[in-house]
Amino acid sequence: MDRAKISAMASKVPTLYEWLGGAEPLNRLIDRFYEKVPSDPILEPLFAQMPKEHFQHVAQFIAEVLGGPDDYSRLHGGHAAMIRHHLGRGITEQQRHRWVGLLLETADELELPSDPEFRSALVAYLEWGSRLAVINSALPADTPVSDAPMPAWNWGVPGGPYQPDTPES
Ligand code: HEM
């Protein structure tokens, strides 16, 4: 392979979705998270009626935000549909905080990448997205929701994963 191509590949910044390993680890994360929810006294009341297949939708939504395939937009109604699911739920700050904490605990348990560049981007998205869920959950269930683009999260200030300097050969 020629030098220009090697250097182009080396400089391609992976998406957050690629960095965490794609669909398989993300599905495991969300699956394991929702396995724990019924025994969490703070979260359990909110999710008691959530149908099993919805867990997969949450994984698809997060995958799309982190740069993965656009399955949630194509199959489940995109950003507006996600917002509609939160309307009228009355999520408290304590529940939001627990939701983010339990998801991150589960990411540790499943050994998702733990580098600070990735984790700071993941935490930023979860904090931002969970606040949106709380705000929308305070609105009446029949509030009309207009289409909004999917958020597209990336690495933020670090710009990508840490790359130790490679000496020129
Ligand atoms: C980044 C933050 C979040 C994202 C991306 C997210 C995403 C989603 C999605 C995609 C759905 C709909 C699933 C479907 O289409 O079938 C959903 C439903 C729901 N979410 Fe969230 N969510 C977030 C935060 C939260 C938080 C913080 C809470 C509460 C602590 C919460 C509570 C719920 C509930 C109660 C439902 C409806 C469950 C049901 O249908 O019974 N979400 N969420």
Image: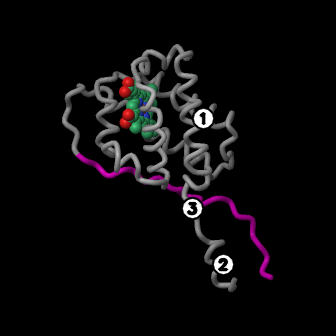
In the rendering, which numbered label is found on residue 7? Answer: 2
Q: Residues within 10 Å of mark 3 (few under 14, many from 20)?
A: few
Who's the residue at 76% across and 72% down the image? 166
Q: Quadrant of the C terminus?
A: bottom right
> Mark 3 belongs to which amino acid?
Gly
In 3D space, how far apart are the residues under numbered discs 1 and 2 (Cα atoms)? 34 Å
The first of marks 3 and 2 along the sequence is 2
Find disc 3 in the rendering and name its residue: 159
Who's the residue at 62% across and 32% down the image? 106
- Under 8 Å from ligand 1: the CB of mark 1? no
The residue indicated by pointer 1 is 104
Above or below for 5 versus 105: below
Q: CA distance from mark 3 to mark 2?
A: 17 Å
Image quarter of residue 33: top right
Q: Which residues are magenta?
A: 147-169
Q: Secondary structure at mark 3?
A: loop
Q: Earlier in the sequence, mark 1 or mark 2?
A: 2
> What is the chief secondary structure element of the magenta stretch?
loop
- Does 36 sit left or right of 80 as displayed? right
Contact between labelled residues 1 and 3, with CB atoms less than 8 Å apart: no
- Please name whichever residue, 44 or 49, is drawn nearer the observer in this view of the structure: 49
Of labels 3 and 2, the one closer to you: 2
Q: Amino acid at mark 1?
A: Leu
